Amino acid sequence: MTNRRTQGSQGEALARTLLETKGFRFVGSNYYCRWGELDLIMLDQNTLVFVEVRMRRSERFGTAMESITRTKQSRLMRSAQDYLLHHPHAGPLRFDVVGILMAAGMTRTQHLENAIESSSFM
């Protein structure tokens, strides 16, 4: 496993733990399709939450949250549509982001609910 992949796995594990302490339930992770990947899929009560995990070693070029481009948002929505074709969900949907900064021996996490506007989704 590459160093980048190892860091990604660590970030996803941190994000999952953070969300589970907030009462979320784990549904799945690393859902791959032709449009991209969904890092985490969680349930927040009856809301299916697609979670993008973004890790940074510094904020020199912007925060983890700022690194999500319109193109990335579009790919996340298409990936979620693909997921829902194979795993239907009748309840509400949401896109969250967990940003993780790992620098100078410290780790800082930030959870942003409804981080990606999904009013035009589906």
Image (tube, rainbow, N blue to C red):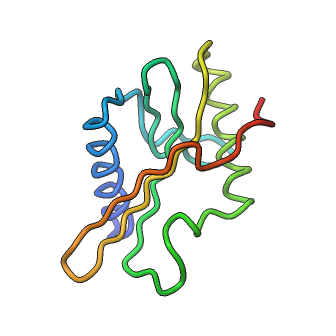
Q: Pick out the residue farthest to the left.
A: 105
User: Which quadrant of the rendered structure holds the C terminus?
Assistant: top right
Towards the viewer: 22 or 72: 22
Image coords of residue 102 (percent x, y): 30, 72
Q: Classify 18 as above or below 120.
A: below
Which residue appears at 41% of the width and 66% of the height? Answer: 55
Q: Position of residue 77 (x, y in %)?
A: 69, 42
Q: Nearer the viewer, residue 25 or 83?
A: 25
Image position of 80 (left or right of 19) = right
The residue furthest top is 90
Give the percent coordinates (x, y) of residue 69: 68, 64
Count of picture labels: 0
In the image, residue 34 sits, relative to residue 54, either above or below, namely above
Expressed as whole percent of the image width and height from the top left, the position of residue 42 reads 43, 31
Q: Residue at x 51, y 33 (%)?
A: 49
User: What residue appears at the point 41 percent right and 72 percent down from the top-left corner?
Assistant: 56
Q: Is residue 31 left or right of residue 99?
A: right
